[in-house]
Amino acid sequence: MTIAAEPAGASPREADDGGVIRTVALTKVFDGRGGKVHAVESLDLSVERGEVFGLLGPNGAGKTTTVGMLTTRVIPTSGEAWVGGIDVVAHPAAAKQVIGVVAQTNTLDRSLDVSENLFFHGRYFGMSAKEAHARTGELLEQFRLADRARAAADELSGGMAQRLMVARAIMHEPDVLFLDEPTSGLDPQSRLALWDVIGELHANGQTIVLTTHYMEEADTLCRRVAIVDHGRLLALDTPSQLKATIGADTELRIQANSDLQALATDLAALPGIDSARVVEDVVYAYVSHGGPTLSDVITHADRQGFAITDVGVKETTLETVFINLTGRDLRE
């Protein structure tokens, strides 16, 4: 399907910076029982054409609401947003022509088989029957679903159903593909298979916006990551640059039957430990290269009278960045 190069509602700023997505002070406030809930607060983003862009945060951070506004399903309270040069609020019908969406839940038509789910989606977006048939065959092969073409949609495994939803979302060749928690609930094998699919789409130049609360997913797939919480943008950069902001190479997680705040304060004073803090009954200590080993830390804590019950060691991750920014665990 051909979309006009200069659709109504195009933003000159989108053309200036080359961003296929642009938001300015994008805000959504819901009326809740306890008062107003600021789901997204003054969000400024620019997503470049052809990149995989991640929105990372815990449940309730505002990721899904942001995607909802960019895909016309949620009307912003204030602010502006463009996708593919189209003002999504002023011209929602035109915006829908340039986006593809894979929601968190299974939205396949269970009255249709696998092939028909693709074919009728193409027809809905204005393809001729011949074009839709050709595109359906192409996508069935690409997503390794050709042998299930006549299977009922509800007969597919979770991984196959997710691949079909991605195939359906790009049936009309959208400018931007939105994937909202695409691997949530999938087994590890299906998750890795979907990562391969996303990598193939990216290699072919597809712009992808990915929301996730899996740190390794964002680290593996995304060129840039925006970390959000309570509706606000906390940080935005490449995964490697975000991790570099911590200034530590190793993260220690320590549990103890002692005063955890006192333990954190004591460890933070050790040479080679950049900082230490208590998050949800765990002491997180960030150790620089050449700093104390885990054995050194345990020995020191024991001598100071702290009864350590469990320890863990890991390299600095995006979760480390999130905890450093918010003071709470990303896995909720």
Image (spheres, rainbow, N blue to C red):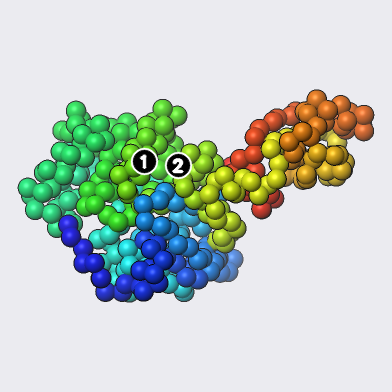
Q: Is the residue under label 2 in contact with that under label 1 (CB below 8 Å)? A: yes
Image side of residue 315 versus residue 192, left or right? right
Q: Nearer the viewer, residue 205 or 183?
A: 205
**Residue at image point 78% right, 44% down:** 274
In the rendered image, the vertical position of residue 106 relative to residue 231, given as above or below: above
Helix, strand or loop status at disc 1? helix
Can you identify the residue that label 2 sits on? 221
Q: Callout 1, which amino acid?
A: Ile
Q: Is residue 40 visible?
A: yes
Where, by quadrant of the figure, is residue 314 drawn? top right
Q: Nearer the viewer, residue 274 or 165?
A: 274
Can you identify the residue that label 1 sits on? 198
Q: Residues within 10 Å of mark 2 (few under 14, many from 20)?
A: many
Residue 198 placed where, x, y %?
A: 36, 41
Q: CA distance from mark 1 to mark 2?
A: 8 Å
Image side of residue 178 versus residue 168, left or right? right
**Residue at image point 66% right, 53% down:** 325
